[in-house]
Image: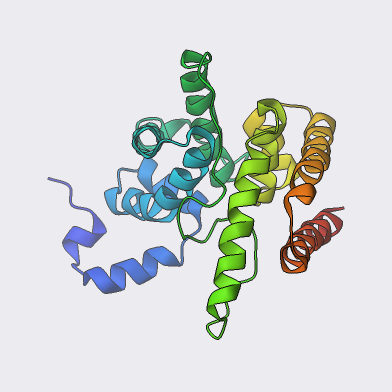
Amino acid sequence: MNLSRDEQFPVSPASARVDLRDIRDEDLIVQVQQGQRKAYDELVSRYKGRLFSFILRMVKDPDLAEELTQETLIRVYIHAAKYREIARFSTWVFTIATNLVRNKMRQRSRRPWTISLNPAPDEDEMPVDPADERADASEDVHRAELATLINEATSKIPEKYRIPFLLREVDQLSYEEIQQVTGLKLGTVRSRINRARNRFRQLIKPMLRNETLLVELEQIEARAAERDNREH
């Protein structure tokens, strides 16, 4: 019987976890290809929350989002051997998830659907400053109100613009990664994101009824512009 290194030289779960946290996604999937289950578990730990949030924004159905998240992670395991480091692992995973969502939405094409930009409090929400522990209740109310307005405005953006918009603004993928996920030409990716941004501004600004919300929105837009400039 062939034993893995971990089985021959047992280590504590805590130390194994720390070691895995230091490994790149792309190296972990290579370990998965070699049959290392712990490497797969680490990838699941890294991506399950992100995938669930991303999918939930598109389908707005927690049960369906959970189902598609599980299906994505199962496909990562089953098709691990197909991964090649010609793209980042995250790009490959989001491509699988996006295709599953598209297939599901085709099946439900006669039913309207919306997106929630703030389905759960995790690290990949719409980029805003971390909450200040000293913030008072009124600031929390403003943030919740802004999240609701963002959701409402985004849900009105046509689907073909919405997906690249979310991949860029929420999941923080580069233009090149979005190109790989969606299969669109790079120029088309940029064009659709710009059109989505313009449509988003047109929709949300009339909804903003106080100066605080407008300032919050301007800060979000400024960070997006700064990120764009760094990639050029």
Q: Quadrant of residue 180?
A: top right
Seen in the picture, residue 87 relative to 122 is either above or below; the reply is above
Along the viewing direction, whichever of 117 and 101 lies nearer the viewer: 117
Residue 4 lies, in percent from the top left, at 23, 54
Q: How has the structure been colored for display?
A: rainbow
At which x and y percent is residue 56? Answer: 47, 40
Query: What residue occupies the far front of the structure in this picture?
Result: 209
Give the mark count. 0
Q: Looking at the picture, tell me which residue is in the foreground, 174 or 23.
A: 174
Q: Quadrant of residue 61?
A: top left
> Viewed as shown, does residue 53 lie left or right of 160?
left
Q: Relative to residue 113, is residue 230 depicted above or below?
A: below
Horizontal and vertical percent position of residue 228: 82, 54
Tell whether 186 sits left or right of 180: right
**Identity of the residue drawn at 53% across and 35% down:** 58
- On the question of residue 98 being in view, the answer is yes
Q: Quadrant of the N terminus?
A: top left
Expressed as whole percent of the image width and height from the top left, the position of residue 15 reads 29, 73
Q: Could you tell me if residue 183 is visible in this image?
A: no
Front residue of 87 and 95 = 95
Q: Is residue 177 above or below residue 71?
A: below
- The answer to whether 64 appears left or right of 10 in the picture is right
Residue at image location 48% in from the left, 33% down from the top: 59
The residue positioned 71% from the left and 34% from the top of the image is 179
Image point (80%, 46%), residue name: 201
As drawn, which residue projects farthest toward the bottom? Answer: 134
